[in-house]
Each structure stands twice: as structure tokens, then as C-alpha cells.
Image (cartoon, rainbow, N blue to C red):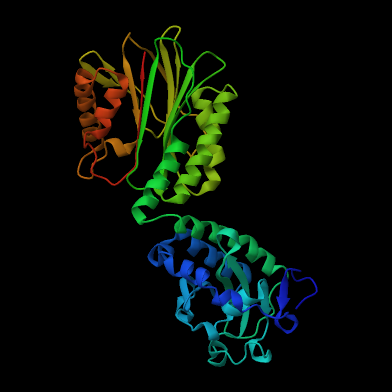
Amino acid sequence: MSNDQSASALSVDRLPALDWTVLSDPARSALVERLDRAALARSATLQRVVDLAAIFAQSAFAQISLIGDAQYVPVAHGTANSLNGTPIQDSLCSITMAAGRSMIIDDTSRHGWVRELRPVSAGKVGSYLGVPLRGADGVMLGALCVYNDHATVWPPHLASALEDLLAFAATEIQQLTTIDSQESSLEQLTIAIQNIVAPPPVAVPPGLQLAGRYRSANVGGDWYEWTPTAQGEIALTIGDVSGHGLAAVANMTRLKAHIHAYLLEGHAPAQTLQLASRAFQDSGQIATALDARYRPVGRRLTYASAGHPPPLIVRRDDAFFAPMQPGAPLGFATLAPPTQSLVLDPADTVVFCTDGMYEQRQSTLDESLERLRLNAVAAARTADTLDGFVDQLLHIPLSDTSDDACLMALRA
């Protein structure tokens, strides 16, 4: 082992006495056996961890091993050589657990600790680096390991890098162990996203009403927000980051924070979207967004769009889409989109939404938006309050796609 190698790692020829009692602990084994193996195997986070581990180590193989009655491998990089099902007595990860710290072996055939183990004698593991995986309260669950079928001089500081990476896997496994089922997992994730999406309570001018809803269908990057500004306006933003899953949620959170910061700095809607587009360009994704400012004095609504549908104005027994020339989606262009404005009538309701509210596969965009317009008129006729209006509109089945939806409304 190099003198620069992590101090927390041990080469096998300098290992202290191994603590095999960790493997015989029945409570630990029972915890591993209770893990939802199907959920672990589906976890994009765990798969990303082993893929990154292989990239860091420049190894052919990497895996997370959980040690229960036998070695279980929920995710692996280079699955053709996966060591799933290896008996405990033949598992290098079992030795890593017994060591209690990272273990580095440049050449498994030259070390008495492991050279007789079946994966080594069979030529599957010629070099190995393992990092113990601990769950809640420090309980040992298994190991993250990288390996090759030939001898390898592992890079300096690799063990400490994998230890840092393993923290993400430990957090993911801990979340899965505290969830009773996939349905409750989705519920918890939905609640977490709702807390990110929904704006906190804010004071609004007398006579002004605001309401918003988030509907989860397939965890995505939809959001909405309203915020009072120092200029005496209410800023209203809504948007949709492309894609689904945790990556879309992470990019949505980042983009929402950028837009919030820019509007608090006093930028107008078009400039806010321009700055957000520049900040979003390195994400590898695109997003649509609409930024509006409502000034109660004069009842003026000023707005700009980056590829997002226009606001819908519900007025008495009719509704119309506000005139708008949208700019390019965020992440594409750095030019400011056009700005429009209009003056609202008393009791007008302004509706902002994402495409999960109206999009249908077999319909054109104009046809889908027309259905939204007609249903908004119908909901306005029967709802007594703004909250009742958004609830009715949210639950009308206008879209046939499995997409999240955000709906926000202002009543002047």
C-alpha cells in the first residue's frame, strides 16, 4: 500500500485481529434480511453509487454487498461478475465487516487472509478494495467494494473517496428501512416534494386571494411560488423541469432557488428568466417557466414566459388566455423573453398551471388548452371560494399523461 493511502484503510497484511462477532449478531442479520430487496435493486441512487465507485477506481467491477445469511448484491457495476449469493465464509466483504474499516488488497493471490476464498481461487477477484457499510446506529450491514480479476495497484486516497461516496448509499438504505412499503415510500417522497414545491405562508394585501396545489403522479420537476417583493408587488412563478425522478427534483429545487433570489434582487420578470436560463445551462436539462408580477395599485399584471403556457384569465362567465409571446425554454437561450402586461378587472381570477393539468397525447396543444379554459369557466360558476375553485379544477381529469401538475390562482 502506498504511504499516501488513506490512514483509515488497512492493507491485509497489517490487519488487526478480526471481530467475527459482528457477523454472528442475530439482530444485525435480521435487519439485513428485512430490507426490501426489490426496492434496493430499483434504487437509482444505489446504482449511481456503484457506477461512480467503478469510475473513481477505474475498476471493471463494483458492488454493494449486504451480509445476512449469505452475501446479497442489490446493485453492481459489471454484473456479469457479480458475487451475489457468495457464502459468508467465502465473502471478502465479510472480512471487511470483521475488520471494521476499509480494506485494500492489491493482489489477492499473495495474501493468506483471502487467497483460499472461492472468488479468489476461481479467478473472479484478483484485487479488492472494500469499505464497510453501516446503517442506523452504526449497525454493520455490508460493504461497498471495487475489484478486478487481476492484480491492481489501487490509486492513493481511493479508500477515503469511497467512504465519502458510501454516505449516499447509507442514507438511501436507511430511508428504505424506515418505509413499510413502496406505496408509503411514494407517499413520503410526495410529501417531501410538496414541502419543496408549495410556497410558505406570506402576508398578502387585503382583498387579494392566492391558492395553489401540487398533484403528484410521477415524481417530476414541477413547482410554483408566490412572494411579496420590496416594490409592493406579488411575484408569481411557475415552471416545469424536464424529466422525472430525483434528478428532476434536484434541478427543480436549484432552479426555483435561483429565480427566487433574482426576483428578491428586484429584477423584472424577463430579466429574472434570462438570469435563470444562464444559471440553468450547465444542468443538462431544459425547463419552462412563467414569471409574473401583480401590482394591486392599478391592478396590473406584468409577465414573461420561457416556453411556458400563458396565464388564463377567468372573467365573469368566460375565460381567455392572456396575450403572450413566449421566449425559449430555460437552458437554451440567454436572451430575455418578451414582456407583456394587462390590467385586471375586479374579481378576475388568474390561473397558472403546468402541462400535467391539461396535456393529452391525442390532442393538439390548442385543443388541450381549450378544454382547460372551458373547465375553468365551469369550476368558477360552482365554486364559492378560490380554494374550492382550484380543488375542482385540479380534480377534473383533463390530462391523460402520468405527469405531475401544479396549479396556482390569484383573485384580484
Furthest residue toward right = 3
Asked if residue 329 shows in the view, the reply is: no
Q: Name the side, left or right, on which 253 lies relative to 370.
A: right
The C terminus: image quadrant = top left
Residue at 54% in and 56% down: 171
Give percent across and percent down for residue 32: 48, 68
Looking at the image, residue 239 lies above or below residue 13: above
Residue at image point 52% right, 13% down: 232
The image quadrant where one finds the N terminus is: bottom right
Side (left or right) of 23 relative to 344:
right
| Extreme residue toward the front, this view | 26
Residue at left 29%, top 36%? Answer: 357
**Which of these two is toward me, 9 or 305?**
9
Q: Is residue 346 left or right of residue 56?
A: left
Q: How many marks?
A: 0
Q: Relative to 33, say whether 336 is above or below.
A: above
Percent from the top left, x then y, of residue 369? 25, 31
Quadrant for residue 209, please give it. Answer: top left
Q: Is residue 102 left or right of residue 25?
A: right
Does residue 318 sit above or below 46 in this rendering? above
Residue 71 screen position, x and y as percent: 49, 77
**86 or 411, which is in the foreground?**
86
- Image coordinates of residue 367 in percent, x first then y, are 21, 34
Residue 121 in view here: yes
Q: Where 308 falls versus 154 (above or below)?
A: above
Taking depth in this image into account, of 189 and 154 the one nearest to the observer is: 189
